[in-house]
């Protein structure tokens, strides 16, 4: 069974330099995050949560506006 996480990690391995997310910032500039950049951001989130005492199976609430950071937070959790 392929979970979203497994598919994401497969994309990171297979297409590390391909665009994962493209978005327009507050200054109307277009930005692109590659799969490897998105994975690195997710790893930082995961590290922060672990250092903060969050363990596997703990519940984590996410409340934020529509933002490209949601993907890195989602995969970091």
Image (tube, rainbow, N blue to C red):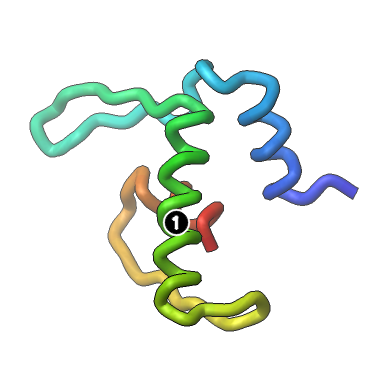
- Expressed as whole percent of the image width and height from the top left, the position of residue 42 reads 48, 49
- Above or below, 15 relative to 60: above
Q: Is 36 placed left or right of 29 in the picture?
A: right
Q: Which residue is mark 1?
A: 73
- Expressed as whole percent of the image width and height from the top left, the position of residue 52 reads 41, 77
- Expressed as whole percent of the image width and height from the top left, the position of residue 30 reads 24, 22
| Residue for point 51% across, 29% down | 36
Give whichever of 48, 61 is nearer the camera: 48
- Expressed as whole percent of the image width and height from the top left, the position of residue 37 reads 43, 32
| Residue for point 83% across, 45% down | 2
Quarter of the picture containing the C terminus is bottom right
Q: Is 40 placed left or right of 69 in the picture?
A: right
| Residue found at the very far front of the displayed protein | 51
| Residue for point 13% across, 38% down | 26
Q: Residues within 10 Å of mark 1 (few under 14, many from 20)?
A: some
| Residue for point 36% across, 43% down | 68
Q: Is 19 placed left or right of 22 in the picture?
A: right
């Amino acid at each position: 069974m392929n979970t979203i996480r497994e598919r994401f990690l497969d994309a990171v391995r297979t297409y590390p330099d391909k665009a994962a997310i493209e978005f327009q910032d507050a200054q109307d500039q277009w930005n692109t995050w590659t799969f490897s950049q998105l994975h690195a951001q997710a790893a930082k989130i995961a590290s922060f949560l672990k250092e903060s005492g969050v363990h596997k199976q703990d519940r984590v609430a996410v409340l934020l506006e529509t933002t490209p950071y949601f993907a890195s937070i989602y995969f970091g959790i």
